[in-house]
Image (tube, rainbow, N blue to C red):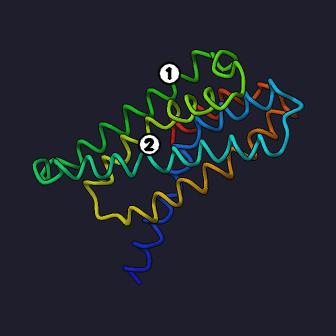
Amino acid sequence: VKLQLQKTRYKMELILIAVALAMDSVAVSIASGSKYRNITFPTIIKIAFLFGLFQGLMPLIGYFAGGLFASFVDSIDHYIAFVILCFLGYKMIKEAQEDDFEDEVENLKNKTLLFLAVATSIDALAIGVTFSFQEIDILYAVSLITIITFLLCVIAVYIGKYMGGFLEDKAEYLGGFI
């Protein structure tokens, strides 16, 4: 029973982390939907795919990079993870207060979307480093992050289309608090 509870807790923590990581991408997706109200379904899928791909790819890169020095910091790894997560949460809340979403989405060209996908996934790189300090199934975690980000971004573009910019900063706050 105790092992089953640990597995459930592990899955719930990963889901919360995935949702938190997705919030930058969700905010940009809402902005995209609100700015481009005639956005097509293939474009929505392209946006969600790129954001999901980079949100999943960055923790993988961070995991392997962190693995290079994880053995050196084994005794303090939980403190490092705590500090990184607190810093990222603070950063997301601060970014939500800046209210610059209209500037983030100037156009939906591939180059712009690629830049936004990388920019919104930098936090995920740091999370990947914290994953390297833990016993974690990285492929499961990366898959979960990718899928959750993809789905939330599809939904977010539609929300942006119909609700405008009202929810953009709320997504950033939610991610920071999680």
Left or right: residue 69 versus residue 174 is left
Q: Nearer the viewer, residue 111 or 139?
A: 111
Element class at badge 1: helix
Q: Identify the residue under disc 1.
A: 94
Q: Residue furthest bottom?
A: 1
Residue 116, numbered label: none
Say if 32 sits above or below 159 in the image. above
Give coordinates of residue 6: x percent, y percent.
Answer: 39, 72
Q: Nearer the viewer, residue 115 or 163?
A: 115
So how many labels did they put on this image?
2
Q: Residue at the location (46% across, 65% down)?
A: 140
Amino acid type at image mark 1: Lys
Q: Residue at the location (12% across, 52% down)?
A: 75
Say if 117 sits above or below 105 in the image. below
Name the mark nearer the viewer: 1 or 2: 2
Q: Nearer the viewer, residue 154 or 75?
A: 154
Left or right: residue 78 versus residue 58 is left
Identify the image quadrant of residue 105. top right
Near mark 1 (Cα within 10 A), the count class, few <14, some 14-19 or many ≥20, is: some
Q: Residue at the location (66% across, 30% down)?
A: 28
Give coordinates of residue 141: x percent, y percent.
Answer: 45, 60
Amino acid type at image mark 2: Ala
Discs 1, 2 touching: Cβ within 8 Å: no
Give coordinates of residue 155: x percent, y percent.
Answer: 76, 46
Identify the image quadrant of residue 42. top right
Q: Identify the residue under disc 2.
A: 124
Quarter the N terminus occupies: bottom left
Say if 43 sits above or below 166 in the image. below
Element class at badge 2: helix
Left or right: residue 176 versus residue 168 is left
Q: CA distance from mark 1 to mark 2?
A: 17 Å
Q: Residue at the location (18% across, 50% down)?
A: 68
